Amino acid sequence: MIFDTLDHSAHYAGLGDRIRTALKFLQDTDLSALPVGRIDIDGDNLYALVQEYTTKPQEQGMWEAHRQYIDIQYVQRGQERMGFASLERMELGEYVPEKDFLPMSGEGNFVAVFAGAFVVFFPQDGHMPGLRVDAPEPVRKVVLKVKLEA
């Protein structure tokens, strides 16, 4: 897992072309002009999911992970808590390949992610996004789905 701001995104260029392209997209794009929904950047290899929602209590959150994609979750507006945990410490559910979704349960750690910050979740990182910090609040977030390079 990586937690940082776009000001430091150049430090992660060595993680691969797709991650570099994804972070450049966040820096160079007028994110406020993007419609909610999927934005293709490089087909299924790299795409953005623009989301708007109200944060929720932790009891309504769900632990998840992905096997085919890295998530770069960038909070554009608002703030939210995100949980993170190593898969080795979680009880894994049944993987759903068509949704690249691995549900899980267990205990993790949490971080408050503010506007302008991003979190990178790799396949070994369970995560629980979308949680309220103090009270529910509206959030606009761009999640970049980065397909693992073979």
Image: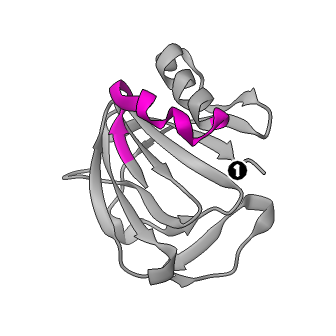
Callout 1 crowding tier (Cα within 10 Å): few <14, some 14–19, many ≥20: some
Which of the 4 image quadrants contains residue 57?
bottom left
Whether residue 31 is visible to the viewer of this picture, yes or no, is yes
Magenta-span inclusion, residue 22: no
Residue at image location 22% in from the left, 51% down from the top: 135
* Residue occupied by mark 1: 148
Q: How many marks?
A: 1
Q: Is residue 5 magenta?
A: yes
Element under label 1?
loop
Amino acid at circle 1: Leu
63 sits to left or right of 78: right
The percent coordinates of residue 127 (x first, y second) are: 46, 62
| Location of residue 96 (image quadrant) | bottom right
The main secondary structure of the magenta stretch is helix
Which region shows up in magenta? 3-18
Relative height, residue 10 to residue 79 (above, below): above
Q: Position of residue 98 (x, y in %)?
A: 80, 61
Residue 59 rendering spot, x and y as whole percentages? 36, 71
Of all residues shown, which one is farthest toward the left?
134
Q: Which quarter of the image is occupied by the N terminus?
A: bottom left
- Could you say which quadrant of the image residue 46 lies in? top right
Q: Report the residue at 52% width, 29% height from top.
A: 23
Residue farthest along the front direction in this orientation: 14
